[in-house]
Image: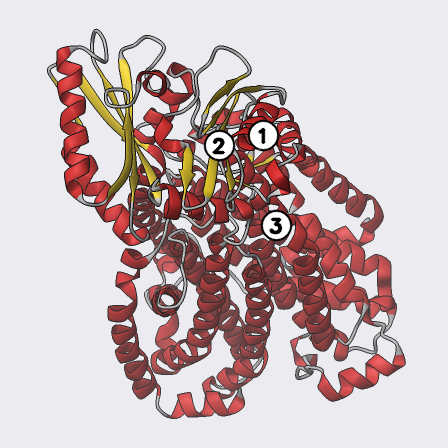
Amino acid sequence: MRGIARRIISAPRRVLAIVALAMVAIGIFGVPVAKSLSPSGFNDPGAQSSQAAQLLTDKFGQGDVQLLVVVTAPDRYDSPAGRAAALDVIDQLKRSGHVAGISSAWTSPAKAAAALVSRDHKSGLIVAGITGDDSSQQTYTKDLSDRITRDRDGIVIRTGGTAMVNLQVTEQSQHDLLLMESIAVPLSFLVLVWVFGGLFAAALPVAVGLTAILGALAVLRVTTFFTDVSIFALNLTTAMGLALAIDYTLLMISRYRDELAGGSDHDEALVRTMESAGRTVLFSATTVALSMGAMALFPMHFLKSFAYAGVATVAFAALAAIVITPAAITLLGDRLDSLDVRRLARRAFGRPDPVARPVDQQFWYRSTKFVMKRAVPIGLAGVVVLLILGAPFLGVRPGFPDDRVLPASASAHQVGDQLRSDFANNFETAIPVLIPDAAGLSDGQIARYAADLSRVPEVSAVSAPMGEFAAGDLVGPPAAATGLASGSALLTVESTAPLFSDESEDQLDRLHAVGTPGDRAVQFAGTAQTNRDSVQAITSRLPLVLGLIAVIMLVLLFLLTGSVILPAKALVLNVLSLTAAFGALVWIFQDGNLNALGTTSTGTLVANMPVLLFCIAFGLSMDYEVFLVSRIREFWLASPQTAADNDESVALGVGHTGRVITAAALIMAISFAALIAAHVSFMRMFGLGLALAVLADATLVRLVLVPAFMHVLGRWNWWAPKPLVKVHQRLGISEAPAARHTH
């Protein structure tokens, strides 16, 4: 770090010019990445539901995704005007060249058509499969929807289904991204001006953040050449790029000012800043990146995409912070604090300039001393509060996102609501059952299997190639969705069990338990099976991911502190800091309190969200842990290392970093809270969860529970077995003594 600092000090203009040119080139390459991203990726591609879905596409001509078109007439769906409008839509779908397997209330056989008519007989449904890859599907869907959607002569035509959900989620996400930036950047800049004072100093983190975002976008575009990447990764890139850039830049500038106040000249202060704060930035970035990178172990492209985006954003944020920040500081010199808005405000209101006070007279030092004098009751109270706030998470019910993640104004949401309320058959609850190898099976064997399936509780009907087996008087789905193809057989189970409920799970177990014809393997598709497969994919890998994160963090924090106690304490408190956020997500979005913040509550929580929130928020918690503990350790190493010195080191560490951590957390919370403006519900959920986690960690945990626990542990904070002490002496990270920073 010293070498980097010396080189940057010798040629700051050249460094900034090279960075600027590189960022222009990277930006030109990376910014168009949104066109290559996918709105899907929530399911496990290796699960049986995904394999069954692929079989439906390959052998039964159902298309890659489903487009649903609802045609509503003022009198009856089959009135002359309604029929003419529907047949025109069907004709346009057929002529598009990108549609497979069209069924409709107007063209299917009578029994199958009845399932496609609403209860009031005013609306009819057209079901079509859109072919092509993700990008092509959205292009075709948009073109078709724009051509067929209309309100004319009393006929209302609306488009929905998975194809439309994917398209509208992509369009909404791109709009939300611009909205988020328009909120987060100005508010963050205002807070930066309040923290830094000088406009130049406040603009520096924004420049670092822009560099991190552009770099991450370029990495994401390269990644799209090899695998699918979720469009929601863009939201994380923008929010985290700005937040981490502010974190790292704020830490470095704060440390630089401390060094100047300690008597160093500009160059020496910058070198010492790089040796301490610069090293801390790299170490912190490593912990955050490894925590986020663990999401790549999950099979879902949604979580993998956040791993790619998170690691890339953290890497570029840290790199930009240790290159751009020292170069700008060197170039600006004393002008770093020029254009101080706070000074102008004080003059305008006739207030005197603040007088610098010793650290032991400042709020953060004194509040830490207060906490440590009452460590046990305050610590226990803080733990109890967080556990109470997290209690709702004990009732979490994981689910799969559907059209209701979109705002109620979206046509896909409107069509979904209409299907759930106005049509007798809910296509979302249907369970396709495929026999991939049906060669040699007789009609009688398949018929007996269908009849056995129909006897499972809450199964209303089963459609098989040779007919329908009904548990009641309800008809099955259109014949085009049922049959034999290329040696495979498809049966469709109609279910009345509510999705994501205990009844649905019990029914799925009973369906799987039914003996198959000739003991042939079967595959289940449908939303219920997809949800089960996705939850199992997460829960089966969760112990590995959590264990890996825990081991990585324990090792890294041991290398930083030389202690085995502090890393264990950090793990416990970091997990505790997430409880409030997890509880809030369930209480608000799953249970529907506070009107679910304007979203549609489905009674479930998107299964990927808790994992995503944990990996990202846990990494960010470690970010603040490294900032604080590295500074506490500096003072501890410079002291005689008694129990009293432990308390004093904690107070001094918090005194020197408390303002920085709080300001950084506030700005990071603003960046994430801007996601609450998103109109895709789980991104609103994601933004609120991260904002709450960051604020809880930086305030209640970092500035209250950490001092309380470290006081109770005393000198044991710094204990390690002798063999590990030797390991740390050889491999650990040592900081320069901070004796001259005492009060």
Please state which of the two labelled residues, at mark 2 or mark 1, is closer to the viewer.
Answer: 1
Q: Amino acid at mark 3?
A: Ile
Residue, disc 1: 449
Quarter of the image for the C terminus: give it. bottom right
Q: Name the residue at 84% across, 48% down.
A: 376
Q: Between residues 386 and 41, which one lies in front from this camera angle?
A: 41
The reply to whether discs 2 and 1 touch (Cβ–Cβ < 8 Å) is: yes
**Mark 1 Cα shell of 10 Å, populated few (<14), some (14-19), many (≥20):** some
Residue, disc 2: 491
The reply to whether discs 3 and 2 touch (Cβ–Cβ < 8 Å) is: no
* Residues at marks 3 and 2, CA–CA distance in whole angstroms: 28 Å
Q: Residue furthest right?
A: 722
Q: Name the residue at 49% across, 67% down.
A: 311
Q: Residue furthest left?
A: 153
Q: Amino acid at mark 1?
A: Tyr
* Residues at marks 3 and 1, CA–CA distance in whole angstroms: 32 Å
User: Does 83 sit above or below residue 88?
Assistant: above
* Residues at marks 2 and 1, CA–CA distance in whole angstroms: 9 Å
Residue, disc 3: 538
Q: Earlier in the sequence, mark 3 or mark 1?
A: 1
